[in-house]
Amino acid sequence: MAAYYETGHVKNVATFLKYNQFLATLGAAYNPSNTTITLPSFTTSQSLGSAKQSAVNTNKENWKDATNNRTDEFDPLPSFTTQILGALKSTQATQQTIDDFAFLVGKMQGYSNSQKSTQNSKTVAPSTIPTIDPSNPTPINPTKSNSQQSFDQKIEHFEKMILILQTVPSYTPNEVNLQIISLQAKLANLKLLNKNAEQAKSDLKAALIDRNLFFYAKDTGVLDLIKKSKEYIKSVFGPQSQQYKTALTFKFVRVIPKKKSK
């Protein structure tokens, strides 16, 4: 989300308060018949607008936290599943089982079938591992498959890996973090973190829509109502009046186009 846009929204909230303070100085002369632009109505709207902006800020921070927590847990998965593969290879698992597991490791790292190494384990050559942007699970290197890199798909791959391990009686590592019960707990945590991040994203979107409609909706949004208020001031005091000229000094930024605020 661009800093400019959020700065614009915050500025509008602050300017709205100042505009209401200006209207109060006009006294009883500011008495529009349109109840949506009266000072009491604007005072209520200013409080609501401030609350809606605060809700955006809060949900944005929650989204950042949830997304960062998810990233911290998902980023090590390619390396960790390679460790598990090593543990599996040290058992009496069949070569087919190892190959099946290695195939999923390759998917976890973002490789398609045609890009897998033809070496014994059929894992991807280390030199071809793509760079991953933490904010985007898609590999930056365009030559690699990105079809298996969503968080949901990574969860699916990991779950299939656990199912494969459960078919290998000799897979009983002494290392706690590699034991099946630990892997199942990790899977549950991955699902929870992904769910939390997606919910936080939805909550943020809802808060943004609510704030944007309130300020920028055609005719009913705060910015359009303030335009009507300024027109009323011009009608009462005159276009050359100091009151109208002062009203025009309160600048609002239409951050969201009208067609996107409906």
Image (cartoon, helix red, strand yellow):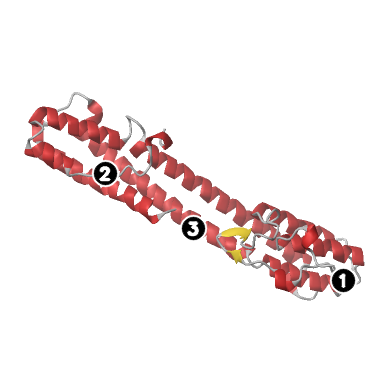
**Residue 120 badge:** 1
Quadrant of residue 178 in the image?
A: bottom right
In-image side of 65 versus 113 (left or right): left
Label 3, secondary structure: give it.
helix
Asked whether the residues under the numbered discs 1 and 2 touch, taking CB atoms below 8 Å apart as contact, a structural biologist would say no
Q: Tell me which residue sits at (86%, 66%) in the image.
A: 98
Relative to 18, does residue 165 appear above or below in the rendering? below
Q: Which residue is mark 3?
A: 64
Asked whether the residues under the numbered discs 1 and 3 touch, taking CB atoms below 8 Å apart as contact, a structural biologist would say no
- Give the alpha-carbon distance from disc 3 to disc 2, as whole Å: 28 Å
Mark 1 vs mark 3: give the one in front. 1
Relative to 231, does residue 167 appear above or below in the rendering? below
Label 2, secondary structure: give it.
loop
**Residue 14 badge:** none
Residue situated in front as seen by the camera: 133 or 154: 133
Q: Amino acid at mark 2?
A: Phe
Location of residue 184 in the rendering, given as x and y in whole percent from the top left corner: 73, 61
Q: Tell me which residue sits at (65%, 54%) in the image.
A: 150
Few, some or many residues within 10 Å of mark 1 (<14, 14–19, 20+): few
Asked whether the residues under the numbered discs 3 and 2 touch, taking CB atoms below 8 Å apart as contact, a structural biologist would say no
- Give the alpha-carbon distance from disc 1 to disc 2, as whole Å: 65 Å
Q: Which residue is mark 2?
A: 252
Location of residue 18 in the rendering, given as x and y in whole percent from the top left corner: 19, 46
Q: Amino acid at mark 1?
A: Asn
In-image side of 94 versus 195 (left or right): right
Q: Amino acid at mark 3?
A: Lys
